[in-house]
Image (tube, rainbow, N blue to C red):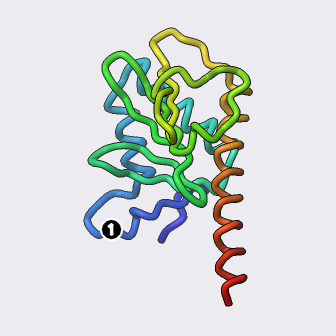
Amino acid sequence: MKKVTGTMTKTDAVEGQAPASERIDARIAELGDWRGKMLGRVRKLIKEVDPEVVEEWKWRGVPVWEHAGIICTGETYKAVVKMTFAKGASLEDPSGLFNSSLDGNTRRAIDIHEGQEIDEDALKALIRAAVDLNLSVQAERSGRSRKKT
């Protein structure tokens, strides 16, 4: 595993493939429109909240940010940039950012449309909550494994 400009990438170890961070850079550049700018902005906010975030490139081209589990993905579609939080249904969302995938028991998403402003403070709080949830689940699991011994 390599460290790339402060962000770890597991997929760096896959021979013959560019590191996930470079693939995300390329996706942002290839979009070349508001979606690329928004994906870059979201990525920057995630890294500000969690400098230890691990960037992945999964499912044939989806940027994924992880820390003790998946925090969120950054999908781009024709009309939206979608941030899907893996455990979003378990997160408090006092600012009401979640506006998509609201019916499931696990995930929640934020669809960001062209020209839409995002509440960066609220989004950062949601990202921090997702990281904290992942870390608490990880700690709980490691505590359980110690108790069994």
Residue that protrudes farthest toward the bottom in the picture? 149
Q: Which residue is mark 1?
A: 14
| Residue 91 in view, yes or no | yes
Mark 1, secondary structure of its residue? loop
Compared to residue 107, the image places residue 140 above or below, namely below
Q: Does 28 appear above or below 4?
A: above
Q: Residue at image x 72%, y 74%?
A: 143
The image shows residue 51, relative to residue 95, as above or below, that is below
Residue drawn at the location 47% of the way across and 22% of the way down: 111
Q: Nearer the viewer, residue 142 or 115?
A: 142
Q: Nearer the viewer, residue 51 or 75?
A: 75
Residue 5 image offset from top left, x and y in percent: 57, 55
The picture quadrant where one finds residue 140 is: bottom right
**In percent of the image, x 51 and y 39: which residue is there?**
105
Q: Mark 1: which amino acid?
A: Val
- Residue 71, compared with residue 45, is above or below; it is below
Quarter of the image with the C terminus in it = bottom right
Is residue 5 visible in the rendered image? The answer is no
Image spot of residue 60 (x, y percent): 27, 47
Give percent across and percent down for residue 18.
Answer: 33, 57
Tally the numbered discs: 1
Image location (x, y in percent) of residue 119: 67, 20
For disc 1, the neighbor class at 10 Å (few under 14, some 14 to 19, many from 20) is few
Please give left or right for residue 10 compared with residue 76 in the image: right
Residue for point 36% across, 47% down: 23
